[in-house]
Amino acid sequence: MLFLVFLGAFLIFAASILYWLLGTNRYGGDRPAAALQLTAREGAMADAAVKPAVCRTVRVYFIKPSRYDEDGFVQYFRYGVQPNNTLTVMTALNEAFNKRYAVERNVRLETVIWDEICDGIVSPETITAIKDKAREDGVELLIGLAGVQSNQYPRGRDLALQFVAEGIPTMMGGFHVSGFPDSCKFLNECGVTTVVGEAENIWGDIVEDFLRGELKIGYSVTQGIRAKTGQEDIIVPLITESLLPVLDDRYLTRFFNDTMTTLDTSRGCPFTCSYCSVKNVMGRTMRSREPDAVVTWVRDACRHHGIESLFLVDDDFFRSPRWEEILTGLVEVKKEYPKLSFMMQVDVDASCYANVAEGETETAKHRRSKRFTELAAAAGCYQAFVGIESLNPDNLNFATKYQNTDDRQGKGKLEAVRAHVIDKYRRVVNNWHKVGVSVHAGYMLGFPFDGPDCGRVAAATLKKIGFDIVSFFIMTPLPGTEDQVRFTKEGAIIDWDFNQLDSQHVTLKHDKLDTESWLGAYRDAYKGFYSIPRFLHTMLTVCAGRGLDAEARKGVLRQFTYYFFSYRQGRHPMVGGIWPIRRRDVRRAAVTDDEARRFYLGGKRFDAILRGDGAEGFAGAPA
């Protein structure tokens, strides 16, 4: 009994010593009876016991410029149609930088994304407010005009020059500057940094140079793999582990369907179409993201952001080297989130050979096509966008779109090849419809072998074949394409205003079409396909008789209605939004680059200003 008493006393003593060692001395000695002081002691700053460190904050604006309308006003809509993938990808790059350097470098990038089409117009007053707010908050500014297409270049250029005039570091990237060196040269002369190609593996270098105060005048991709284009080989980055977009819930509310977003799972296009700028910027070598990362991203988007619809912006998802893994993963996600659906872009072979036609023997091509269509439908695909471009095989061969004619050598007889093309298109539609997926065709008007009736014939034939939606485009010589190079040499380009490259303006000479008849063909195509009787029939029958599933029928109804009214309101459906708002205080002031330089930079060469030659009085004129 005495032993137990001594043992208990010893344990109590030992516990007291342990508490004193671990419970008291771990705070650095005996603490006063007063409450624990959580802040630095008085006088610590004075004797340098605590050294303050100011976090360096850079406010980065990623701005997607709009374009000017027919009257020179900036196009702006209450609701956009589709979020911009470039803006969300660039946000992801900034977040990755913050995770890596926020503690290590005490630097933070604050991201603001601004889509002019639906977020509002960036006016001169807006630019002043951006600058004043940054000064008030004690942050630095960096402006990035992101994902600029050719028809947005004039608006983007005007914005860039206004930011430069305010002394704000400004960059521009996108398809236009990546494919048209002359615009890069002009922007560089005016002090605008250009970013050529995909930004993933050069954004870190840009940020580092900015932080050192050594931002270069131009950046381009130098690390990656060599890829063929329609002209010279280029370097493109591998995207296997590239960052996926970061969704911004605020940004999603700016769109008519706030449960829809965009995602790229692969980049590049293996084909040689002469009118297309994709292969000349992203190369013909297909590169895919890691399938598990894509599937995880989609699941998180559904779970945390309420996403129900996706647009896979891959230029040809069927040619992605990892499509089967991605679709298999999406099938599992759809089991968790039954409302998940998506649309995608593919070529004609994606569905054409999903059936074995009379006289054919089943091959690996047939099995692959069948597997793709069935798996896509099971994963939630409600619409496939297919670039058919023309019904005339001579036009397709002129554009080197041989995948539609299967007549690369041009040896087939015209009528036989034409019949083959029509049959191929019919199989494309029928095989997608068999699995409940609607088909959206892309069609171009104004190829060399088109005549004044090309629009009327196209509308009638495409309806007969069974396409659900068609986007008609006036043939346009996009900068950086083989067509643009060819037509420039031939002197066939009659309008060099890039604002007009919106697929509904005539900018070329044509042997068979003058401007009026070309626009007439475009009008005939849209009004023929989106006629009032067909609109009513589609609405009242809810796309009956096409074998489409419920989501595909809803998609066709939405798009048919939108296309029907967009054309009649004078804008191309793919270059606009819903509920236009006209701001009359901002209007186009310059057409050419030189006019813009004189107007916004006071007629002085910016490189002279940088040298200090007569910089006084330098200011940008109001738009």
Image: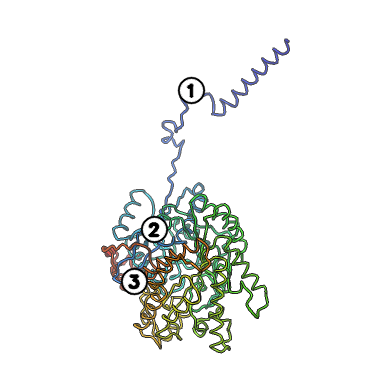
The numbered mark, 3 or 1, whose residue comes first in the sequence reads 1
Query: Residue 59 or 586: which is nearer the viewer?
Result: 586
Rounded to the nearest angstrom, the CA distance separating label 3 from label 1 is 78 Å
Q: Residue at x 47, y 54 (%)?
A: 247
The numbered mark, 2 or 3, whose residue comes first in the sequence reads 2
Q: Residue at x 48, y 21 (%)?
A: 33
Q: Amino acid at mark 3?
A: Gly
According to the picture, the residue beneath numbered tag 3 turns out to be 570
Rounded to the nearest angstrom, the CA distance separating label 1 from label 2 is 54 Å
Residue 489 higher or lower than 572, as above or below: below
Q: Residue at x 48, y 75 (%)?
A: 276
SS for callout 1: loop
- Badge 1: how crowded within 10 Å, few (<14), some, or many (20+)? few
Is the C-beta separation of discs 1 and 2 under 8 Å? Answer: no
SS for callout 2: strand
Rounded to the nearest angstrom, the CA distance separating label 2 from label 3 is 25 Å
Residue 410 higher or lower than 232, as above or below: below
Quarter-of-image position of residue 527: bottom left
Q: Amino acid at mark 1?
A: Pro
SS for callout 3: loop
- Mark linked to residue 592: none
Using the rendered image of the protein, determine whether residue 74 is visible from the camera's viewpoint.
Answer: yes
Query: Residue 70 or 546: which is nearer the viewer?
Result: 546
